[in-house]
Image (spheres, helix red, strand yellow):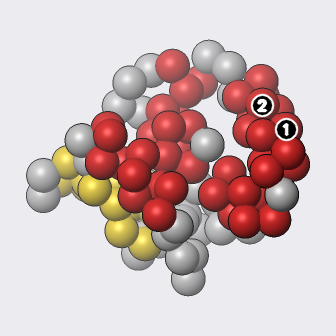
Amino acid sequence: MYQILPYSYQQAKRLGVFITPSDNSKKKIDVFKGNKKIASIGDPNYQDYPNYLKKDRALAEERRRLYHLRHKGNSDNVGTPAYYASKILW
């Protein structure tokens, strides 16, 4: 099971949502607004910014930059799973 790090909790709070570890074994995090689940985000087989940050800040920043380049356009639509993944995990 994925351990949510403080960075992700802070980002979720900034967006006005709350997060929990996902019930879906193929996702890292479930995103809720009020009592309604609005998205499941993150593949547990891949690292994310908070986990890279634990290892090396320069590596984390480079991986974040590359993530945003790869997902440019997908994560711009507010309310989509891609949006929440971009804002909470990266």
Quarter the N terminus occupies: bottom right
Q: CA distance from mark 2 to mark 1?
A: 5 Å
Is the residue 87 above or below the residue 6 in the image?
Answer: above
- Residue placed most toward the observer, 45 or 55: 55
x then y, percent, for residue 58 = 85, 45
- Residue placed most toward the observer, 81 or 60: 60
Query: How many residues crowd around disc 2 within 10 Å: few (fewer than 14), some, or many (20 or more)?
Result: few
Is the residue 56 above or below the residue 59 in the image?
Answer: below
Query: How many residues crowd around disc 1 within 10 Å: few (fewer than 14), some, or many (20 or more)?
Result: few
User: Which secondary structure lies at badge 1?
Assistant: helix
Going by the numbered disc 1, the residue's amino acid type is Glu
Is the residue 87 above or below the residue 69 in the image?
Answer: below
- Looking at the image, the residue that sits furthest to the front is 57
- Looking at the image, the residue that sits furthest to the bottom is 1
Residue drawn at (32%, 38%) of the image: 15
Residue drawn at (36%, 68%) of the image: 20
Left or right relative to 7: residue 68: right
In the picture of the structure, the residue carrying the numbered disc 2 is 65
Q: Quadrant of residue 40?
A: bottom left
x then y, percent, for residue 66 = 82, 33
In the picture of the structure, the residue carrying the numbered disc 1 is 62
Going by the numbered disc 2, the residue's amino acid type is Arg
User: Which secondary structure lies at badge 2?
Assistant: helix
Task: Give the number of marks.
Answer: 2
x then y, percent, for residue 85 = 53, 44
Residue drawn at (64%, 57%) of the image: 50
Q: Quadrant of residue 71?
A: top right
Q: Are marks 2 and 1 in contact (CB under 8 Å)?
A: yes
The numbered mark at residue 33 is none
Left or right relative to 54: residue 33: left
Quarter the C terminus occupies: top right
- Looking at the image, the residue that sits furthest to the left is 35
